[in-house]
Image: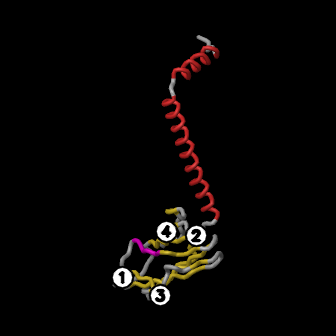
Amino acid sequence: MEQINPEEIFNSLKEYALQTGPIEWAAAAGLFIILLIAISMMSGKRRRKKKAKTVAPRLSLQGFQVSPMGRDAYLKVLNNGQLAHITDLSIKGRRDISVKNEVAGHQMPSGESYRILLESVGAEKLSNNFTIELTYMDQLGNVYQQNFPMKQQIAKPAKLIRLA
């Protein structure tokens, strides 16, 4: 095996540095600065995501009940985290269900629950064959989306869809 001589490496680096001109040095410095900016931007986003987790609301499904006639139902959502502002509600899997109460703009403080009243407007009775998708914001303006499948009666974890 051939041994590496540190003195030869140093001499070759010194010779290369002497041969390069100001244009090469400027280009290398520019690349280095761009690399530093990119690294700092990535770490800033990581910090914001970590902070978003600390102020995130934690919504869970507290109850789902269909009326005896099968035309009405209510869904009870509990907030175990920080303050949440509900911005949107959509129903996946069924088109004949309407929401009776106003959901958008409602604030859910920590430890509070909110009932969402549902009504079947079609011929089919209500059952647990649909999913409710809530979109909400935290105190910083981060937007989350969370699915509540009625068959499983367990809320899926919230997804952070937009950082403030």
Mark 4 burial class by Cα count in 10 Å: few <14, some 14-19, many 20+ = many
Tell me the residue that label 4 is attached to. Answer: 147
Residue depth check, mark 2 versus mark 4: number of the one nearer the observer: 2
Q: Which residue is mark 2?
A: 138
Q: Which of labels 1 and 3 is toward the front?
A: 1
Where is 38 relative to 66, above or below? above
Label 3 amino acid? Answer: Pro
User: x, y percentage for residue 117?
Assistant: 49, 84
Furthest residue in direction bottom, as rendered: 69
Mark 3, Cα crowd under 10 Å, few <14 / some 14-19 / many 20+, is few
Q: Which residue is mark 3?
A: 68
Q: Looking at the figure, which quarter contains the C terminus?
A: bottom right
User: Looking at the image, which residue is at 49% across and 79% down?
Assistant: 104
Given the image, on which type of amino acid does mark 4 rest? Asn
CA gap between label 4 and label 3 equals 25 Å
Instruction: Give the class, few, some or many, for how many residues have Cα within 10 Å of label 2's Cα (few <14, many ≥20).
Output: many
Residue positioned 41% across, 82% down in the render: 98
- Secondary structure beneath disc 2? loop
Labels 3, 2: front one: 2
Return the residue at label 1. Answer: 124
Q: Amino acid at mark 2?
A: Asp
